[in-house]
Amino acid sequence: MKTIAVVGKNFGDEGKGLAVDYLSLHSSKALVVRHNGGAQSGHTVELKNRVTSHDMISAGGERFVFHELSSGSLRHADTLWIESFYPDLYKLSEEAENFKATFGYVPSVYAMENTCITIPDDILINMALESSRGKERHGSCGMGINECDIRTGAGYGLTLREIRDLDTEGLLRRLSEIRRSHTWKRIEELSGLINESASEYIELLHDENVLLNASETMIENFKYIKLLTEESLKVLLEDIETLIFETGQGLLLDCENEEYAPHVTASRTGIHNPCAFLRRMGLELDEVMYVTRSYVTRHGAGYLPCECDKEILGSIDKDLTNEPNEWQGHIRYAAHESEEGFISSIKKDISEYGHKAMNISLLVTHLNETENRVITNNRRIPINDFASIPAIRGLFSEIYLSSTRYAEDITRIL
């Protein structure tokens, strides 16, 4: 079995969904691991050709944005949630049923039994806090990932194994208990940071019907999940050809990246989680594929080096996945800082968690928008020249290129 992690090099939106789709396309039996963040990620995959496989028949050009299902789903790769992923069980049915309506089936979702979920209170606290920040927003998606992490760390996590053994009434009691024991203490801690602009979210925290509705939906949605112990996971892996780790966000948004704090995510966005999980299984990470656009984007608040108008970069298409929204505003654009700056975050990631035998590859996307050039702060480098730069050639054993939205069109030059 080959193990490979897909990691965004920058601030997210690099094309990780495309990378996972490509790897799944070229594997006869892939399992894709969601290992960080939660339902806030939006990874886009678009079909090029008509596909006929099992009970799946779809015309080319179909597009789907993945949040909790894996981006390998169109190639019949199953999804695995591990403990460092915080799924939103309430929202799962929306994604699963939308996928079924488009492609005719629901992908299999496996989950480690100790995986903790986000709950309504996490989301409401997140929204209350972020809306109160006004122009000082951190750029959160309002999906409660950080609050879920804080609650779980405080001893009030809610695992999928617990939910398996509950009915709607039992889950309602559990959510109400968390609200009494944790939520109101957390609101008190944040009292100096939450203002009147967040009153609608605080009111919902007083509404028992919010928890009742969530309990009913979450119990119903459990039907989409197959729980695994470590023993049953090892049995499942015996039949897997490629284990792909699909990472949310980008390296520069890692929760331990002090350079960009506080405008970072609540999770590890590099190879930390995949390596830790594989060690538990007695395995190693064989390859990490870092993904970048030929330029840089950031959707959300925070410092963006070399920020510029998108017209300076090239003929940039409208980003349909990253539409302007209340929580993150507009997508922003920038050039890469320099050739050395291009690889600095990657070198840091692999120096801390990688090993000598690990293969390092790169996928450069959106090259059609920049005339097959990588845009740095002072240069527009043709992609073949870029691949020949000693620092680039010395780090990456393979370089893949994408000039379309389709995995079938990805090429390799190194």
Image: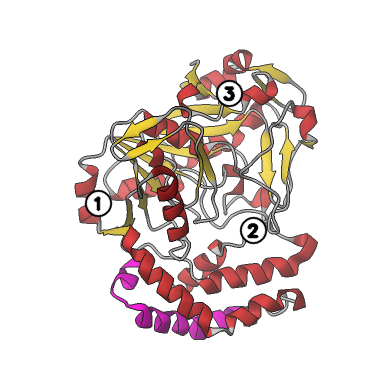
Q: Which residue was labeled with disc 2?
A: 140
Q: Tell me the distance, in whole angstroms, between the alpha carbons under discs 3 and 2.
A: 30 Å
Query: Quarter holding the N terminus?
Result: top left
**341 to 270, vertically: above or below:** above
Q: Name which of mark 3 and mark 1 comes first in the sequence.
A: 1
- Label 3: few (<14), some (14–19) or many (≥20) C-alpha neighbours in 10 Å: some
Q: Secondary structure at mark 2?
A: loop
Find the magenta span and give its range: 160-186
Residue indicated by mark 1: 233
Q: Label 3 sits on what residue type?
A: Ser
Find numbered disc 1 in the image and state the secondary structure of the residue it sits on: helix
The image quarter in which residue 250 lies: top right
Answer whether residue 54 is visible to the viewer in this image: yes
Q: Amino acid at mark 1?
A: Leu
Query: For the residues marked 2 and 1, what is the alpha-carbon distance in whole angstroms?
Result: 33 Å
The amino acid marked with disc number 2 is Ser
